Amino acid sequence: MNLPKIHSISKKILVGALGAFLSFFLLFHASANLLILRHDGGEWYNAFCHFMGTYIIVKVMEIGLLAALLLHVVLAIWLAVTNKMARPKGYHKPQRSKTHTGSKLQVWTGILIFACLIMHFTDFYFVKIGLVKGKYLAKTEDVVALKTTQPDAINYAEQHGEYSAKENWLTNFDKEDKAVLEAAGLEVEPDFYHQAREKFKILHIVISYLVFFTVVWFHLRHGFAAVFQTFGLYNYKYGKAIEVLGQIYTWVVCLMFAVVVIGVYFGLEL
Amino acid sequence: MKLDSKIPAGPLAEKWTNYKASQKLVNPANKRKLDIIVVGTGLAGASAAASLGAMGFNVDIFCIQDSPRRAHSIAAQGGINAAKNYQNDGDSVERLFRDTIKGGDYRAREANVYRLAEVSGAIIDQCVAQGVPFARDYGGLLDNRSFGGAQVSRTFYAKGQTGQQLLLGAYGALSREIARGTVKLHTRCEMMDLVVVEGRARGIIVRNLVTGDLERYAAHAVVLATGGYGNLYYLSTNAMNSNGSAAWVCHRKGAAFANPCYVQIHPTCIPVHGDYQSKLTLMSESLRNDGRIWVPKKKEDAEAIRAGKLKPTEIPEENRDYYLERRYPAFGNLVPRDVASRAAKERCDAGYGVGTGYAVYLDFADAIQCLGKDVVEQKYGNLFQMYQKITDENPYETPMMIYPAIHYTMGGLWVDYELQTTIPGLFAAGEANFSDHGANRLGASALMQGLADGYFVLPYTMQNYLADQIYVGKISATTPEFDAAEEVVRVRLNRLLQIGAQATLNSKLSTLNSVDHFHKALGKIMWEYCGMARNTESLTKAKKLVSELEEEFWKKVFIPGTSNEFNPELEKAYRLEDYFELAQLVIDDAMHREESCGGHFRTEHQTQDGETLRDDERFMYVAAWEYQGHGHTETMEKEPLVYEHIQIANRNYK
Amino acid sequence: MKFTLHIWRQENARAKGHFETYPLEGISPDCSFLEMLDILNEQLINDHIAHPVCFDNDCREGICGMCGLYINGRPHGNDDGITTCQLHMRKFHDGDDIWIEPWRAKPFPVIRDLVVDRSAFDKIIQAGGYISTTTGGVPDANTIPVPKHKADMAMDAASCIGCGACVAACKNASAMLFVGAKVSHLALLPQGQIEAADRVHKMVCKMDELGFGSCTNTYACEAECPKLIKRQNISRLNRQWIGALFGRDRK
């Protein structure tokens, strides 16, 4: 196979740049997640999700994000394979040099993250693209008006879901309800707030997500400073600062994710 | 054999200029038709090959290591001298010339030394242009330090790794020429013989050390830059693979060998500590800038230290004998190497030695107190670390222990002003020749000489030789001379391997010994009887012992394996075979030179206070020896040393 | 002291190698690692059991870069900032098992036993690891001032001895520290600026071509470098590379 010629350092710079992009997304994602903990029945969070799911520029960026993820994975595996080829015969004694453990695990944490992402997508993202069923909501112009035109549907909805007067949303429907609402001509979209609230009540899901975040922690902890190194920005003067910044960033992102999951499990609402 | 040193006419300061103005040159188009072989990739070899390649000659370069960068020049620590006078402390070409002549105890050729001093400045320019990271001061200009035998600071340095940096500079220049295709590199190849055709050096036979194959290379001229023969003494500061064989095979083919008895013993090496020891590690001479050398004043203190009952730090100031400062107040700890070495030996022989009894202290307590630990660490940190790794002692807390060890050989192939040996077309550069240091070399001058020869002397003088070689055409490597030379090598290798095979047949295998066993024994004899101090009696004894050992070697050496494989034991064996002959010559030369000068100290010839006593009437000459066949005493030819410019004086560092 | 040595034996480049076990007794703790191997070889020669163990070595004072053994999972053994020849037996415990392997990397094929061919490093340097000068015709040394801190950093990078421990230690057999050290050394000096962009491009291309792996920022190289060359030099190499992506623009 004739692969395009990309020099090793350029390849790494690409992996690093994509990684940096992805880790910025993580910070964004984690910050947004905090809205789940808000004591508002998911109003803000679902409003945010609605914006993310409908705004055209965000939709384009979403494709970009997925492409970045895939390219990051493909290039990293390509590098890993060529790197393996650089030492056809290995050592008998395992390496005992003093190095960061995280860095040696980077490929493996990356693969684990990919596996965890499939779980995560099954729980949330695939609901959105219709591959998996989850919780749904319907946004209406005016519930009061709707009650007069389609009373059956609204009554059904009020019995099975919840009604948010402020935003005129009908939320927290199960997948069986989705068809009924759609038949009534309501526009249905995923209800990630209630989806999260339901999923993270289940202990084994909480645990698997915490494992997921730990793996992300390892991946990020090495990745952050490594990106600076690969971009040639790691030097004597700022080396320490970059490492500290990397630690802070990693902890903040991972803790934010973890707080939401644990908070939901214990029914925390603020 | 007739020695013609070919010193150009005219006043000393104009000789080199005159030579360059009137020498023959090779036109650019002809240069690529001329082949040159360079053996050795140290400072002299690499710089010569790079310069000659850049000029357009067709160069083949050979080294025994896996890369040209491994040559032992890399281990030089302290620095390189140059008469730049950047410090405005009174340095000049004339001053460097005088210091070198005096340092060599008036046994060096004036014209060569003057030329060396003259081109020294250009070496620094060249190295800086190549990117050698010399030490600098805060203004960004070059820094200097002082070295033994000089009262000015003219030594340029790059931490304690100056040799490494200079070699990497030359290696870079060489690599560039290899990339351009003007130089072809042959690594892990050892020169086994010189091929002489119609009286001229025309090629070499090499052994590919990986496959064991013998290969032939033909050229219009051969440059030998293979270093010295210090490993004759087994324990030395030389690298394990450094050897004198390439020079010796040339000597066998007719190149005269000059002043073999001038061997330099470096005063500051880590002392011997066990039988298993394979080499001695040098501690840079630069340490003597700030370190003070002493032994206990009282014998009982020295005894207590040796018994481990007393620590050096417990000896009060008044009970310490800073013997160099005491004996040589003007130069103090910075006397030349031979002087410092002998003084250490004198104290140890008198029973004041510490450690095993053969060691003195090099103390930095004063320097640390006065300059601060940081400054000392910055200046010498890597040397201190090296010392600590080897000895497991912290030199910041307890004084270092040092003792003299074989370091450099001033003797080597005899060369004329053009660095050409007595075989036309065979040139010798760097430590392999004898030319510039007389009976003792000053610190930081070996690097200077190697680079001067390679960058600034050979590129001129070789053209003078090669100018008419263009008529000869391409040299063929299939002539009978090449066949014969290769056959000699083959026979030689077989003869060595036969010893073990014979013993196996006679089931006498258990009586055999390794090559190292014999090498260690030879080293011991030479160090004991032909080392720092020599006399008729010891030399006579040495000669006898060496002969006996050689005889035993030929009966009992066991070399495993064959000659057609990677076989380090075989390499050691043929190098040692040459050392046996060389040892005899060193002894003969030491015996005949009935005077003391520089590194050659005959106990019969010393002043009342134990300094060298020269005999200028009888021995102001270079002794050039001619090979007469194995087991035959060599004949000696004298090249008188004529000092037109310099005033001969007693060498006084008091 | 007493040791059990497990040494990689391989007759030549084509042969299939294996580990051989040799017990060794009566070793002084002040003995260097290579001297310990000398003693073993002396015994092998005297007992006529096997061909002595081949290993590269030369200066035995840590500067030539010739020696290099992978000892119990660490290049140059269990100490920091040293070469194999500077490793002393006092760093081991009495009765230790010592596994000795050659450098393992595709560009460093084994020649015999523990001896490997490192000429790949020379090829990288030949690709551009120098400043193009010819002898003579250069300016006076002091007409090129260099800020002291830069000269010092250049010196630190230039102290690389080309032993290959960085490659041996790296899980990817990457030569980035070696290349980074040379690129840094020359890029830090004004003399080296002129060819900087071309140099980094050529050296990295050659490094890739020779089959070295790439850097995954594990820094095992830094941990094992006998001359303590820092990862900052790899960073500078990357920076130079990015600069060269645009800096090599020409007609």
Image (tube, rainbow, N blue to C red):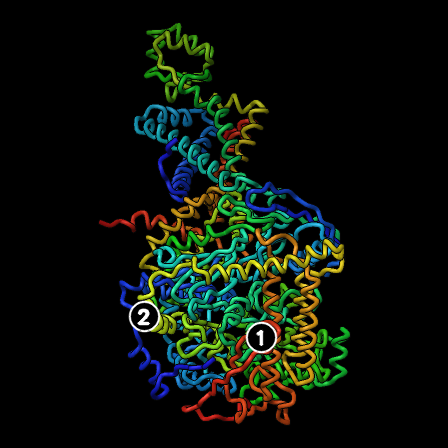
Mark 2 = which residue?
B468
| Residue B358, image x, y percentages | 69, 76
Q: Are marks 2 and 1 on the same chain?
A: yes
Residue B526, visible in the rendered structure = yes
Front residue of this view, candidates B157 and A134: B157
Front residue of this view, candidates B638 and C22: B638
User: Hey, which residue is sitting farthest front in the picture?
Assistant: B480
**Dot 2: few (<14), some (14–19), or many (≥20) neighbours within 10 Å?**
few
| Residue A202, image x, y percentages | 57, 22
Residue C217 drawn above or below residue B426: above
Q: Circle 1 marks a residue in which chain? A: B
Q: Secondary structure at mark 2?
A: loop
| Residue B215, image x, y percentages | 48, 56
Residue C83 drawn above or below residue A246: below
User: Hey, which residue is sitting farthest left in the picture?
Assistant: C251
Q: CB under 8 Å between callouts 2 and 1?
A: no
How many numbered marks does the figure carry? 2
User: Hey, which residue is sitting farthest top in the picture?
Assistant: A152
Measuring 51% from the left and 64% from the top, which residue is drawn there?
B193
Mark 1 = which residue?
B368
Q: Secondary structure at mark 1?
A: helix
Which mark lies nearer to you, 2 or 1? 2
Q: Circle 2 marks a residue in which chain? A: B
Query: How much space separates mark 2 and mark 1, taking CA atoms?
Result: 61 Å
The kind of residue on which mark 1 rests is Ile
Measuring 43% from the left and 66% from the top, which residue is drawn there?
B197
Q: Residue A102 sits in which quadrant?
A: top right
Residue B409 drawn above or below residue C119: below
